[in-house]
Amino acid sequence: MRYRSLGKTGLMVSEIGLGGEWLERHNAAEVQAVIDRCAEQGINILDCWMSEPNVRANIGAALKGQREKWYIQGHIGSTWQNGQYVRTRALPQVQTAFEDLLTRMRTDYIDLGMIHFVDEKAEFARIMNGEFIDYVRGLKAAGKIRHIGLSTHNPDVARLAAEHGEIEMILFSINPAFDMMPPTEHIDDYFAETYDASLGGIRPERAALYQICEQNGVGITVMKGYAGGRLFTAEQSPFGAALTPVQCLHYALTRPAVASVMVGFDSPAHVDAAVAYETASEAEKDYATVLANAPHHAYSGQCTYCGHCAPCPAGIDIAMVNKLLDLAKMQPETPASLRAHYESLSANAADCIACGGCETRCPFGVPVVSRMQEAVAAFK
């Protein structure tokens, strides 16, 4: 495993990290197995944005006896209310959720205290000039967080953070598809339907962001490195050409200021597949040839299972339903195992009331309501 300096934090982090999101659907023993394999492979940084109590507790139990070997990237503003994830800036809920994170992680500090999911410049200004940042500063002064970070999908917000001076690192979505997308303050139309072919690659504002981060010593950890797995098949890739996990990792890790890619793991085998990057040949890492010969560069309306559509008033785990639907659509017939998983959900697509709130929160413009209708038909 190779290690990189995470900007001015001075932390030396593994270039392959653990994105904890998929651990939500696993029991304590399975979480333990994934984290143990990560440790064996030299991974030393994990991201826990999830507020669901069980996954936090399971991760905390798995870290017992090895806390000092890990850098925890924990989120401030991700809360659990009435059985659902809620992003909020309301301090009573924020404070309760953060203390819960410490308790369930069995630690008295978080290495990287992340201001959670800021995608609008106006919201960034409100945070950095209000009581929320005062609370974060207080956590750092008390030693409950060691460094201040911020997570965003929007390059304009990321740039504001990188130039602010107080934000030491950012969690940002990077992959070849996202790098061709324009910035926007309006989450519901975050992505253009097509790319400007004359650009021939990365959007200028995203390229500038990475350079500014490098110049200012603001490290980047990466989310959405695989675009939710969409880049792995030509049929689902926005390029009309497939990339491998190794190529996706190499793309992200060759951006300036990037220190680590936070990869979602369901099993020890998934850990090994990502860590294969460390011994991959240059030919195996070559994404440029694939992209140069790709027939098109279109991306819109694709779910990457990020969970920002929550909370759902009907209690539906929308990201999971979308995940199961996509898996089902890859098969000639819906497998019984997927059907059983879908039916085991406490609420499923049939419970959708078509309120549309999820669609206004989706960073990727996914037509969630119609997807729920599609899922009802697929799992009938």
Image: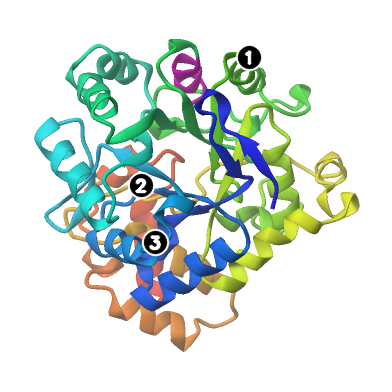
| Residue at x 35% of width, y 43% of height | 74
Of the residues tagged 3 and 1, which is closer to the observer?
3
The answer to whether 130 appears left or right of 286 in the picture is left
Q: Is residue 380 visible?
A: no
The answer to whether the residue labelled 1 contacts the one labelled 2, judged by CB atoms less than 8 Å apart, is no
In the displayed structure image, the side of residue 99 where residue 48 appears, left or right: right
**Residue occupied by mark 2:** 49
Q: Which residues are magenta?
A: 154-162
Where's residue 277, x and y in %?
A: 74, 55
- Residue sitting at x 39%, y 31%: 187
Q: Which quadrant, please, contains the C terminus?
A: bottom left
Give the residue pinned by disc 1. 215
Tell me where residue 80 appears, x and y as whole percent.
19, 51
Residue type highlighted by circle 3: Leu
Disc 2 residue type (three-letter): Trp
Please provide percent x and percent y for residue 364. Answer: 46, 41
**Residue 180, located in which quarter of the rendered image?**
top right
Q: In which image quadrant can residue 134 be found?
A: top left
Distance from the alpha carbon under mark 1 to that under mark 2: 27 Å
127 lies above or below 36: above
For the point 54% across and 83% down, the residue is 333
User: Of callouts 3 and 1, which one flags the residue occurring earlier in the amino acid sequence?
Assistant: 3
Name which residue type carries label 1.
Answer: Gln
Q: Position of residue 230 (x, y in %)?
A: 61, 55
Residue 63: mark: 3
Task: Using the rendered image of the protein, determine whether residue 275 is visible from the camera's viewpoint.
Answer: yes
